[in-house]
Image (tube, helix red, strand yellow):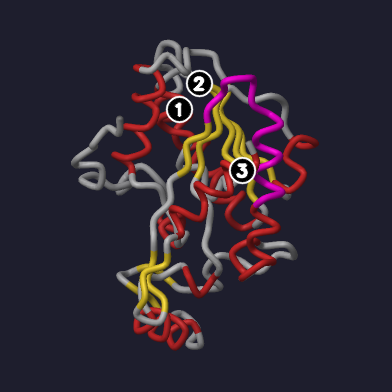
C-alpha cells in the first residue's frame, strides 16, 4: 500500500538558510523533508538519538528537521564549496534553535561517499537525494540550453540566484558522470549505504523523473531497481 502525500512543496527555505545556499541546484523541498522524518517516526523506524546519514549532503538541508526531531545527522559532500555553505547553515541553526529541548546534532564532512563506510559510522536511516548527471539536472532540453548559455556569462543569474559551476567539478563528482559510469558510481554509494544500515534498516531516497530529448526518463524506476539489486 502506498501513501499519498499532498502539499509537500508548499514551503521554502527563505530565512532559514544563507542566501548563497540557494545556488545549490538540487535542494530538498522543506515540507517534503519534514514529512519524511515525520513518517519515519510514525512507522517506528526512528527515535530521538538515532543517526541519519546523507551521502549527498549538499548544503546540509536534511539536517534542520532531523535536529528538530532529536536526531543526529551526518552529511557527506564531495564539493568543498557546498560543505562550507552547509557549515554556515548548521551554525545558523545552532544559534537560532540550539536551546530547544532535545535538539539533535549535525555535522557535514567533505568526502567521497564511494568510501562512506570509512568516513562515518553506522546509520539508523539513510535519507538523501541523488543527483542526475549535469545535463539531467534540469527538466527539458530548452532549459538545459538556457542554463548553459547563462553559465558562460560570469555573474549571470536565474531566478535571482547566481549561476556558477552548478553541481561542482571535483574529481569523482557523480553529477558530472553519465551512462554506465554514472550508474557504476551510484551502485558503489548505494552499496556503502546498505553496509551501514542495520538488518531491517531503511533508506529514503528523494528522486524524480526528467525529460531528455522530449522523452520521459524513468530515473525513479532506475534508482529503485538499483537499490533492489544491491539488496
Single out the mark in the foreground, 2 or 3. 3
Q: Are marks 2 and 1 in contact (CB under 8 Å)?
A: yes
**What whole-number distance in Å separates the C-alpha atoms at marks 1 and 3?**
15 Å
The reply to whether dot 1 and dot 3 touch (C-beta < 8 Å) is no
Judge whether residue 200 is colored magenta: yes
Along the line of sight, which residue is nearer the eye, 1 or 138?
A: 1
Pick whichever of labels 2 and 1 is earlier in the sequence: 1
- The residues tagged by marks 2 and 3 sit, at their Cα atoms, a distance apart of 16 Å
Q: CA distance from mark 2 to mark 1?
A: 5 Å
Number of callouts: 3
The magenta segment is: 187-202
Against 103, residue 160 (above or below) is below
Between 45 and 97, the one lying in front of the other is 45
Q: Is residue 17 left or right of residue 195?
A: left
Mark on residue 55?
Answer: 3
Residue bearing the label numbered 2: 71
Amino acid at each position: 500500500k502506498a501513501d499519498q502525500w499532498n502539499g509537500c512543496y508548499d514551503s521554502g527555505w527563505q530565512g532559514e538558510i544563507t542566501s548563497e545556499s540557494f545556488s545549490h541546484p538540487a535542494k530538498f523541498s522543506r515540507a517534503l523533508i519534514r514529512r519524511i522524518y515525520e513518517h519515519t517516526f510514525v512507522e517506528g523506524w526512528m527515535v530521538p538519538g538515532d543517526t541519519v546519514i546523507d551521502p549527498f549532503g549538499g548544503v546540509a538541508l536534511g539536517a534542520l528537521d532531523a535536529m528538530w526531531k532529536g536526531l543526529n545527522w551526518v552529511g557527506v559532500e564531495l564539493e568543498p564549496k557546498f560543505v562550507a555553505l552547509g557549515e554556515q547553515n548548521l551554525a545558523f541553526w545552532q544559534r537560532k534553535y540550539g536551546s530547544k529541548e532535545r535538539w539533535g546534532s549535525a555535522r557535514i564532512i567533505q568526502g567521497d561517499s564511494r568510501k562512506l563506510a570509512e568516513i562515518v559510522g553506522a546509520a539508523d536511516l539513510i535519507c538523501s537525494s541523488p543527483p542526475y548527471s549535469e545535463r539531467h539536472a534540469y527538466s527539458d532540453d530548452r532549459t538545459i540550453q538556457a542554463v548553459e548559455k547563462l553559465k558562460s556569462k560570469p555573474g549571470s543569474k536565474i531566478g535571482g540566484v547566481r549561476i556558477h559551476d552548478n553541481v561542482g567539478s571535483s574529481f569523482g563528482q557523480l553529477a558530472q558522470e553519465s551512462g554506465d559510469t554514472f550508474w557504476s558510481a551510484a551502485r558503489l554509494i548505494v552499496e556503502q549505504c546498505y553496509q551501514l544500515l542495520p538488518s531491517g534498516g531503511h533508506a529514503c531516497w528523494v528522486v524524480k523523473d526528467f525529460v531528455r530529448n522530449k522523452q520521459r526518463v524513468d530515473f525513479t524506476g532506475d534508482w529503485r531497481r538499483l537499490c533492489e539489486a544491491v539488496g
